[in-house]
Amino acid sequence: MTVGQKRILVVDDDAEIRDLLTAVLQKHDLMVDSAGDGAAAYDLLREFHYAVVLIDPVMPGLDGFALLDLIAGGEVISPPVVLVITAADRAAIDRLDAQRIHGIVRKPFDPYEIARLVVACAEIKSRSPFGPMVIATMIAGSPLLALLNRSLS
């Protein structure tokens, strides 16, 4: 990892999505780890500081909903910006706690749009001593609002 490089975690049970996001994010000078389930992701979150975590909430085993609960429990090194990537139906999305996430991106997605979003979130996180709500507000006030709004439709 180079000086100033931000660390990102991609959590999805679909290996193709993990590989695609990892490749695209690495092209933006981000250090990317990935996990195929919530348990592996939780281990990584307890070991490393992540600027941004992309989580699929619907996975076998320890799912993204449970992972969000663990992150909120305070045992991670530093709370990351949390973006949910999902193809789940509206009922599953409604289960998400808006206090624990900063954005939702629907599958299928443009990986380059997600990369721009992740880069912006990581940059805000690295510069701001403020909490997650300030980060969410800063993101919402940016051109990335269209992407986040589109994800909620």
Image (spheres, rainbow, N blue to C red):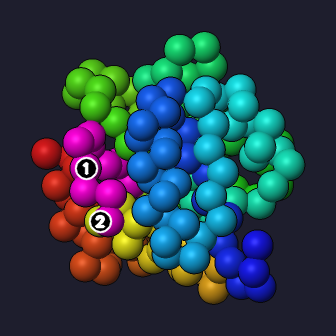
Residue 99 visible in the shown view: no
Q: Can you give x and y, in whole percent of width and height, for residue 58 in the image?
A: 44, 23
- Residue 105 among magenta residues: yes
Q: Position of residue 69 (x, y in %)?
A: 64, 32
Report the span colored magenta: 103-112
Residue 146 image offset from top left, x and y in percent:
19, 67
Q: Is residue 17 above or below residue 121?
A: above
Q: Which mark is residue 46?
A: none
Residue under numbered circle 1? 109
State the residue position of label 2: 113
Q: Is residue 84 magenta?
A: no
| Three-letter code for the amino acid on which mark 1 is drawn | Phe
Q: Residue 36 sits in which quadrant? A: top right
Q: Measure the alpha-carbon separation of dots 1 and 2.
A: 8 Å
Q: Is residue 40 above or below residue 44?
A: above
**Residue lying farthest to the top in this orientation:** 61
x, y percent for residue 22: 52, 54
- Please tell me whether residue 63 is drawn above or below residue 83 in the rendered image: above
- Residue at 77%, 85% in the rendered image: 3
Marks 1,2: beta carbons within 8 A: yes
Q: Quadrant of residue 73?
A: top right
